Amino acid sequence: MSRRNQSGFNLVETVATLAIAATVTGLAVPALNFMFQRAQQSAVLTELASGLQTARTQAIRSGQPVSFCPSADGERCDRGPAPDWADGWILFSDTDADVRRSPGERLLYRYRHLHPSFTLVGSHGLEHGSGFLPGGEALRSGLLDYCAGGDEGRRLHLLESGQWRIEPLSTCRAVGDLTSVLPTPPPERKDATGLKE
């Protein structure tokens, strides 16, 4: 009896191929998720920096203060103890420079809500917003911490000069946990005898 040449895969080859495919997919999905999260983080920070630049430019051009604040409804500034900027924020002409949108103050732009797993929380002066004076200086300096569903985030530091910088934020915590946006005190230093300096 002669055997014919058979083509195809046997059961062992098929199972081995499926195991390799599952392993590669298992490794690729977290990497793709990480890349997607980084791209979204970059887009939000770009939008935030663009909004600040728009506010500053508008204040200089118009000769009147322009402010920005967290706003869930897209009309009024949120005034709770720790509003989440991820609910949305607004840019408006702030004729009285009080960082509160009053009747008659023109709304310039509404920023969208962020993804539910993202947080954007202000501290050290930016809890309820800030703005820019006609000379380009900030009405209030402070920090905005952006976290994208993980332990790592970014911090926007608005300076009194009206400039800002974006820095890495090593730890993110839950919204409303103000300790997440407060700097941790440095550890106590002790001299060689073990006494505090």
Image (cartoon, rainbow, N blue to C red):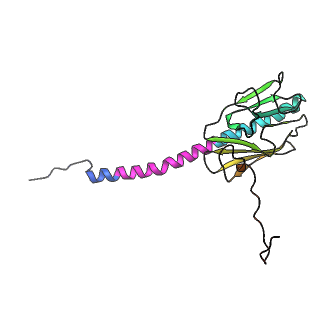
Residue 97: in magenta span: no
**The magenta segment:** 17-40
- Judging depth in this view, the residue of 197 and 49 nearest the camera is 197
State the residue in front, 72 or 165: 72
Kindly identify the residue that appears in the image at 27 percent across and 49 percent down.
9
Q: Nearer the viewer, residue 122 or 134?
A: 122
Q: Quadrant of residue 189?
A: bottom right
Using the image, determine if residue 45 lies above or below residue 58.
below
Tell me if 16 is positioned left or right of 82 in this view: left
Which residue appears at 72% of the width and 28% of the height?
Answer: 110
Q: Nearer the viewer, residue 21 or 195?
A: 195
Q: Whole-percent x and y of residue 102? A: 83, 25
Q: Position of residue 59 (x, y in %)?
A: 86, 32
Residue 27 covered by magenta stretch: yes
> Where is residue 156, by image quadrant?
top right
175 versus 61 height, above or below:
below
Residue at (87, 30) in percent of width and height: 61
